[in-house]
Image (spheres, rainbow, N blue to C red):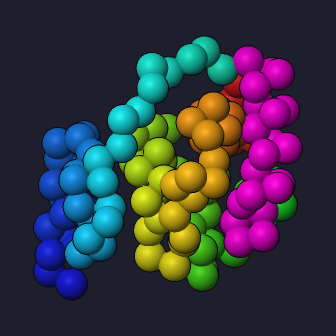
Amino acid sequence: MIRFVFCALALMLSGSVLAQSAGTPDAQAVSVPPAVPFTAEAVEKGREQFHRTCAQCHGRNMVNAGTTVYDLRKFPTEQRERFYTSVINGKGNMPSFKGALELESIELLWTYVATRGGKEL
């Protein structure tokens, strides 16, 4: 538990992606591609990807109670690398999507989440 808290604190302070997270031996640093501008088209594609991949747990249109799963409407928009790391390596009860999602799909998901479903476009 202490190691997890330390890792989370180090991630917040440095803004970098850690090579290992919460004792998961196969968790690896994530190479995040350059950010692309948000567009209405990308938000819509992100919404479609979100409903295929994430809505089962995080709720349709990201609406959930936030008690058993993370409320993505509150995800810090300045923490894009953290988002990629969580999606690729998994976190807590969330499984890894490594190999299941292309980086383009993850970027579309990020566009959807970071714009709060297009509300902050």
Quadrant of the snapshot with the C terminus:
top right
Q: Position of residue 14 (x, y in %)?
A: 17, 42
| Numbered range of the magenta stretch | 39-58
Quadrant of the snapshot with the N terminus:
bottom left
Residue 52: say if magenta. yes
Q: Position of residue 60 (x, y in %)?
A: 83, 61
Residue 57 is at least partly visible in this image: yes
Q: Position of residue 108 (x, y in %)?
A: 68, 34
Residue 67: say if magenta. no
Residue 76 is at least partly visible in this image: no
- Above or below — where is 85 with respect to 3? above
Please report the residue visible at 71 percent of the width from the left and 71 percent of the height from the top.
57
Residue 41 quadrant? top right
- Above or below — where is 8 with respect to 40? below
- Above or below — where is 34 with respect to 3? above
Q: Nearer the viewer, residue 33 or 1?
A: 33
**Is the stretch drawn in magenta largely helix, strand or loop?**
helix
Please report the residue visible at 22 percent of the width from the left and 52 percent of the height from the top.
18
Q: Position of residue 72 (x, y in %)?
A: 61, 56
Q: Nearer the viewer, residue 10 or 105?
A: 105
